[in-house]
Amino acid sequence: MAANATGFTLAPAIASGATYNVSVTGQPAGPTESCSVTSGGTGTASANVSNIVVTCAVSTFTVGGTFTGAAVGTGLTVKDTVSGNIKIVPAGATTFAITPAVNSGSSYSVSVTAQPTSPAQTCSVTGSTGSGTVTTANVTSVVINCITSTFSVGGTIVGYTGSGLVLKDTTNSHQITVPQGSTTFAITPKINSGTAYTVSVLTQPTGPIENCVVTGGTGSGTVTTANVTSVTVNCAGRYVYITNGYDGASGSIASYQITPGTGALTLISSVAGPNTDQPSGIALDPAGAFAYVISFGAADIDTYSITAGAVAPTANTFALVGGDEPYSIVVDPAGANAYVAYTMPSADTFITGFSLTAGILAPTGSYDTGTGDTPFGMAIDPSDAFLFESDQYYSIAGGALTPLGSPTLGLPAPYAFAEFPAGGYFYVTDTTNQTVTGFAYNNTGAPVQVPGTPPATGVDPQSIAIDPLGRFLYVTNSTDGTVSTYTITAGTGQLTAVGAAVATGGGSSTTATAATVDISGQYLYVANGDAGTVTAFAINQTSGVLTQVSGTGITNPTSTLINAGQGGPTAIAAQ
């Protein structure tokens, strides 16, 4: 029968009176149809028979196929764009069929209209399998390949100034060594969407030593549809050490753990000094193995070992001549030499150098400054080329000092000294002028006052602390019980005051207050003299502005005042 015919006549004709029985003996194939006699198909002919009805219906078939690649995730939607039919594919399916079925002879074109999201995947029709014409059976030849998306695991790092930090995704055994000073990180290789991760600190920084932790439960989760950027790693200096000359008759030395992310201090150890020792100053071995402590009660220098932040006395003590009074101590950047400034009963001032070997001090030479000024402070160049104090400045060679003359500071009462971290500048407070002054020096070491008027401090400026990146300088003011904040101009060393001085909460002190910045530059710690307390401040990393850390004021070890108003903590240092 011709395609698209609307009627038919069977030949040859049959005789009148003959019976007939009409049936379909062959179905159409282009398109596939199902035809059947639905009316008048049997009878006896008495004239031409024209009431036979044959009804045809085009066959319908589904369009579908198979998946290759990764197991299908949740949310995949495919569409036959010709018919407009859509199929939402169940997760884990290996085959699919788009319904409803379409007529045989229809064309089809299958595409992906929504990608899986759990896990995130990219699925695409392979080659030309997605298009064609439906013939005599369900289409099963469409091939869709799915690839699971991969994403990195990372986030932010706060306070990382050292080097050598290694972070690890312990679930997937991937790790990264984070470049020095980085504020963000991403662990590679990337991992599949839907994969769990657990980030932890594998190796702590060593240059300088810092304590980094993953905080706030941010280290664990499951990768979804984007790179993970929510892991937070907080770094800070590890320890704070405090000498307390007025803790009982012999004084004490305490060490504290710094909590990354908060700056809070937790007591690790507190040891009493030797009888009548009364420690007054402290300098740390850069490698973190020893603390060198001067004592005004016993006139000596004691070595304390440090293990995991805990201090313990050793037998290594160097006794000064009776009546000598040590006031300041510095250790060179390599930890090879220490220098102690002290006055003698004759009121003369000396500096003695010591070589340092496994915590043992061996004197290498003494240098008479030629004056009777009290040596409250010293500063040592970070390249170990020069040492500065109020009466002399020196070149350094192999631990030996060579006097180069008076630094001509022009200050009536110089007190605290602090060196710029990169060298080239040092800063001095003056308790008469109540100022802090910067001095520049070159390869000759000769100091020249930084241009501009030295900015004012509070009353009785006692201590200077500079953040390790050389951005901010802080001065403690004993009589005011405050801290003054300054920014340091790169390239000139000039100081600019930042707002009003901030109260420490320790009140006025008749003895020195002391300050230190942790090695990450995030926290300032102030020992509050007579109050016998220490206050922690968070440092705004853009402005230098201080915000007291809530609940971090500490009173251990409690200061037992020998005489009312005589003081508490005498020195503070951080690593």
Image (tube, helix red, strand yellow):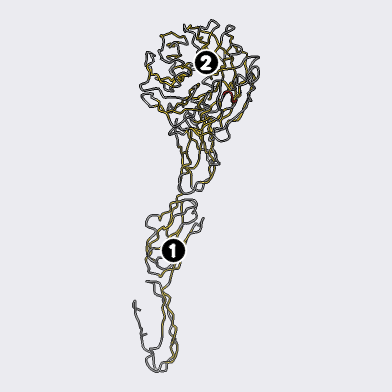
Q: Could you tell whether 213 is left or right of 68 in the image?
A: right
Mark 1 neighbour class, 10 Å CA radius: few under 14, some 14 to 19, many 20 or more: some
Could you say which is closer to the camera, residue 455 or residue 317? 455
Residue 32 in percent (x, y) is at 40, 72
The location of residue 489, given as percent across then percent down, is 38, 27
Q: Residues within 10 Å of mark 2 (few under 14, many from 20)?
A: many
Can you say which quadrant of the picture contains the N terminus? bottom left
Q: Are marks 1 and 2 in contact (CB under 8 Å)?
A: no
Q: Which mark is residue 25?
A: none
Q: Relative to 331, say whether 65 is above or below.
A: below
- Of the two numbered discs 1 and 2 on the same chain, state the one appearing first in sequence: 1
Residue situated in front as seen by the camera: 319 or 182: 319
**Rendered location of residue 191, percent (x, y):** 48, 43
Along the line of sight, the residue nearer the viewer: 329 or 246:
246
Q: Amino acid at mark 2?
A: Ile
Circle 1: element type: strand
Q: Residue furthest top?
A: 346
Q: Would you name the residue on which mark 2 appears?
A: 329
Query: Marks 1 and 2, how far apart in space?
Result: 80 Å
Toward which corner of the image does residue 289 lie, by quadrant? top right
Q: Secondary structure at mark 2?
A: strand
Q: Which residue is mark 1?
A: 86
| In this picture, residue 399 sits left or right of residue 128 | right
The answer to whether 562 appears left or right of 36 in the picture is: right
Q: Vertical placement of 74 versus 437: above or below?
A: below
Q: Is residue 365 above or below residue 47?
A: above
